[in-house]
Amino acid sequence: MIGSIPERKRKELGPTDGQYEGENRSKTSPSPKRLRHPRRQGNELCGRCAKIDLDEALSREHLTVRGQLVKSLGPVKKWAIDSCSLCGLLATSLPPECRSSDSTYYLRSFSSKRDPRLGWKSIDTNMIGFDGCAFFVPQHHDATPVRSLKPDSIDFEILKSWLHQCQEMHTKTCTARTSSTSVPFMKLIDCETRKIVPASNHVYVSLSYMWGANSGIVEYSESLPEGLPPTIEDAITATRKLGFRFLWVDRYCINQQSAEEKSAQVHKMDLIYRNSEITIIAVAGQDPTYGLPGVGQRNRSEQGCARIGKHFLISALGDPRDLVKKSAWITRGWTYQEGLLSRRRLVFTDQQVYYECYGMYCCEALNFPLHEMHLKSGQSLQKSFCEGENIGIFPREVGASPWEILERVEEYSQKSLSHASDILNGILGVLRAFESVHQVGHCSGIPILPPPKTRARLATDTAELPPWNACTGFFIGLCWDLEGTSNRRPGFPSWSWAGWFGRISWEFNEVKYLRTDPGIKLRLELQDGQIANLDTAQESLQKLNASSALSNIIRISAWTTPIRYRRSYSRINGEVECETRVELEDGGYLHWRFHPTTSMQLSTDQAYIGIHLAREPPSPEGFAGPTGPALMVVCDVGDRMERVGFGWIRPIDYQMYGADGVGEYDDDEDGPPLMVNSFYARRPVLVKSWQEIRLG
């Protein structure tokens, strides 16, 4: 009865919820026929489920995404899973831990036309399920929106139809741009002979998988060894069933004992994955011993289905993209660029196969009208079926604009690597793709950003904007911040995000307003002791990065400001901040806080310097802008300086003091506060001097 639902829950369900909780309920057949369902012997309905009117629930109109309440089912542990067909069927959509939970589940009916996920609104059907879980869809003779999947085998004709549709329709979005012969030493597995052969412009499939914690380096051979890991063996089988002969797998196609061959291919991962016709992604499991579910010995989760009265209900399974997002595969650093750089992806999960390219997505269980879901041009799905700016869970190409390289690096910095030394190697393919597609170079991982499409000028600007050059783009690329303090990553410079463990971010949004000071310069120290200016070396920077000719030392010429460290403290959210004293030209000073990069304790006896990287101009009204300048805080470590923190000087973040005031701010500071957290404060003029800093 509706009175048994808690008042708070009834409010969440909406004004139309609960109307099917009445007592005048027709019963379904007392002995429905069970077609197939795991772990269930009985074929009858429990007393509660027998009161559910499926005819009415599956035929009514819906006005909201959340649908309408059908029945409060209580905790799963009280369901008659082994004896009731409907209880057992519904339980297949819930994770095993729900069986011991006290949470109450509410059976709801939904309309596909109202659901924005996975292309459901391309068809017109009603279904039942729970919020955020798989739907159970009635199958009819004239329409089968949900395919019945076998746990032990995959219908590869379905998978091939997706690939053929992409090849025929997505002629502008999903085509390869470069020959595989441009990758030195590239080899492929001949799936018929099981030999390792030169790529020779063969059409091939690539594999993305996890090596696993105990995987060692495989000794290179011109023939595949006996007893391949199941994932590799299944990938060979899948390649042949897809109609291809050649497969690229890193551990067998790259000679791991040859530093030259390994380096040449690691630096061109973008071409290896972009040029493959399709990439098989092994999401299930955590190492190559798991296999591809449904291909070899590993079965998939069984798809629930049952006949309840006159309705044959079948599970649509969960959204496969959720399985990808929760997988170990998506947490790994190397697999990040493999999924990103592939034009077409065939993702094997424990439930079903998911496909996504630059133009569409689809999954094995759902039989949706893909042609009708496309734009008239046929190049991609209509916007209403897409996930924001992306088609599905992967970005289109590496990014639609050059500045998206910041997003890619931020995402990658969250991933894990078995070897800290792989931090740059694991994203070199992405960095190289941005260089070839968007002309964005990098120096040790720091992007050399191009000018935004619109460089805004404000009414208060009196001087011409300095020309945007490589130094401008590099200085703005240096404005990264860490989420919390961190330790150094050995072998990488302190000024690069690659030199630190942890998640990084760039905080600025309105990039078109950013400025750098005229005259800034950057010089690169090479391993052989030579010095190169960034502006003149930019064209050869890709070769310098690839050949490891760069050292970790750069020389920055810019404005600098002395900074006096006072103390560090933790905020309520656990974020660590350093409080400093920064001198002003008028004799006053301000208290400024920045985020320390390093987890080492800073000292009041140490001298620190803030390098001016970028700034925002004054607002048209003449007040201080919301951000700027940005200071990279560095300190002397002998023959060079190293980064220890970063921050923007914002009016809401500082307190300003005069030179001749009386009173106290705290135990060791003189002078009354002139302005506190004032957005309308005059912009402080910092004491600064022009210096060349040797930074490592």
Image (spheres, grey):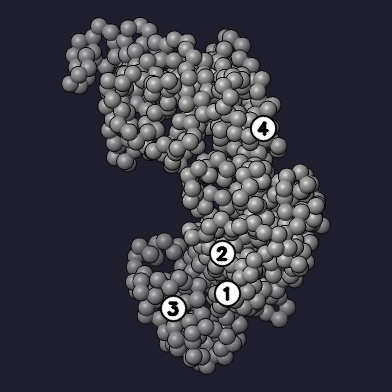
Q: Residue at x 44, y 78 (%)?
A: 22
Q: Comparing marks 4 and 1, which lies closer to the viewer?
A: 4
Q: Comparing marks 1 and 2, which lies closer to the viewer?
A: 2
Residue at image mark 3: 22
Residue at image mark 4: 543
Q: Secondary structure at mark 3?
A: loop
Q: Comparing marks 3 and 4, which lies closer to the viewer?
A: 4
Residue at image mark 1: 298
Q: Amino acid at mark 1?
A: Arg
Q: Comparing marks 1 and 3, which lies closer to the viewer?
A: 1
Label 3, residues with CA under 10 Å away: few <14, some 14-19, many ≥20:
few
> What is the spatial separation of the Cα atoms under label 3 and label 4, in whole angstroms?
74 Å
Residue at image mark 2: 288
Q: Residue at x 64, y 16 (%)?
A: 467
Q: Residue at x 64, y 56 (%)?
A: 220
Coordinates of residue 651 in the picture (x, y in percent): 39, 22
Q: Secondary structure at mark 4?
A: helix
Q: Amino acid at mark 4?
A: Lys
Q: Earlier in the sequence, mark 1 or mark 2?
A: 2
Answer above or below: position of 93 versus 278.
below
> What is the spatial separation of the Cα atoms under label 1 and label 3, in whole angstroms?
46 Å
Answer above or below: position of 54 versus 406.
below
Proximity of marks 1 and 3: CB atoms separated by less than 8 Å:
no
Q: Nearer the viewer, residue 152 or 5?
A: 152
Q: Secondary structure at mark 2?
A: loop
Query: Image check: 207 left or right of 88?
Result: right
Q: Nearer the viewer, residue 601 or 389?
A: 601
Coordinates of residue 197 in the picture (x, y in percent): 75, 57
Label 2, residues with CA under 10 Å away: few <14, some 14-19, many ≥20:
many
Coordinates of residue 15 in the picture (x, y in percent): 45, 63
> What is the spatial separation of the Cα atoms under label 1 and label 2, in whole angstroms?
12 Å
